[in-house]
Amino acid sequence: MAETLVARSALRAHVAPPAAPAGAPGFTLREVPDLTLASVAALKGREAELAEAVRAAYGLDLPQGPKRVASGPVAFVGAGPGKWLAVSSAATDFSALPAAVADQSDGRSAFRLAGPKARETLATLIQVDLHPRAFGAGDVALTHAASIAVTLWQLDDEPSYEILMFRTYAATLWRWIVEAGRSRGVEARLAG
Amino acid sequence: MRIACPFCGPRGVDEFAYLGDATVKRPNADAPDALPAFVEYVYLRDNPAGLHRELWQHALGCQSWLVVTRNVRTHVIDQVEAARDVAAARSSEAE
Ligand SMILES: [Zn+2]
């Protein structure tokens, strides 16, 4: 009998426990569910063609370097020389782009951290300088958090961040963030 | 030690994986002296006390392969280049 595959979060309450602060929250931690993710790698000699196709389809100039550009639900994140991560909060088909495109939606999980203590908490797990003079809205870091490979970007100056990891590490990184946020007023809960 | 990745910027050495000597060149397998040339290519390495060119990968970052020119006595890094640029320059030299 055919089984229907259903997309499910990598997080469960027993591996990704919630946290509530005693006083005012220093920052919130949430999963970002249902993202469409695709790795996009330019084909040799066809970089300009890809840039033009992204501009035509999404009105975005592909960033050079570790930057993120967004328009509506779609964002492109610089992921290496000639490589990007295409991200969408809607159902978006990136496969028509003239590039090597591979869907990553079921392989990664994403969290959003928002609030005045988000930066300080991430700084305990990440060695990249997150001070506003070095890292601001639109900046991207490909690095590791507590030895877990992550892609991190800052969304705005609240500050809020989104952090992407392989989904098998999602619960571990969740607990790292909750633990690091314990003394910084983390308010964390799973959706639903 | 910190390595300035051309894409990501300076990062701690913990983000990088070391591959080895970046100066060796794969010999021509059809040449009459291919066997001793391959023995040298695969096994024999210089051990300079000073500047050395090494292959590193930004494994816990952008995954780029890099050619790092490093003084192995002081850890001072003179230059970091994308390995694909070094390879492209080498093959255009050979033409
Ligand atoms: Zn890098």
Image (tube, coloured by chain):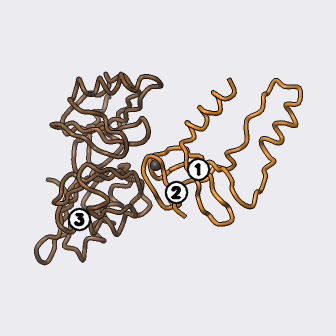
Q: Mark 3 points at which residue?
A: A118
In the rendering, at what x and y percent does residue A12 appear? 26, 56
In the rendering, at what x and y percent does residue B58 appear? 51, 50
Disc 3 element: helix
Q: Which residue is drawn at 25% across and 74% down?
A: A182
Q: Between marks 3 and 2, how big is the CA–CA gap?
A: 27 Å
Residue neighbourhood size for the residue with mark 1, other residues' Cα within 10 Å, grouped as few (<14), some (14–19), many (≥20): many
Q: Mark 1: which amino acid?
A: Trp
Q: Quadrant of the N terminus of chain A?
A: top left
Q: Between marks 2 and 1, how big is the CA–CA gap?
A: 9 Å
The chain ID associated with circle 2 is B
| Residue A130 to residue B63: above or below | below
Mark sitting on residue B3: 2
Q: Residue at x 73, y 37 (%)?
A: B25
Whether residues under marks 2 and 1 lie with C-beta atoms below 8 angstroms apart, the answer is: yes
Q: Residue at x 19, y 73 (%)?
A: A185
Determine which quarter of the picture holds residue A100.
Answer: top left
Same chain letter for marks 2 and 1: yes
In the rendering, at what x and y percent does residue B31 appear? 84, 25
Chain B pictured colour: orange
Q: Which residue is drawn at 43% across and 53% down?
A: B9
In the rendering, at what x and y percent does residue B65 appear? 55, 44
Which of the two discs, 2 and 1, sits closer to the camera?
A: 2
Q: Name the residue under label 1.
A: B56
Q: The brown chain is which one?
A: A
**Closer to us: B57 or A64:** A64
Q: In this view, does A177 lie to the left or right of B21?
A: left
Q: Mark 3: which amino acid?
A: Ala
Q: In this view, does A149 lie to the left or right of B41?
A: left
The chain ID associated with circle 1 is B
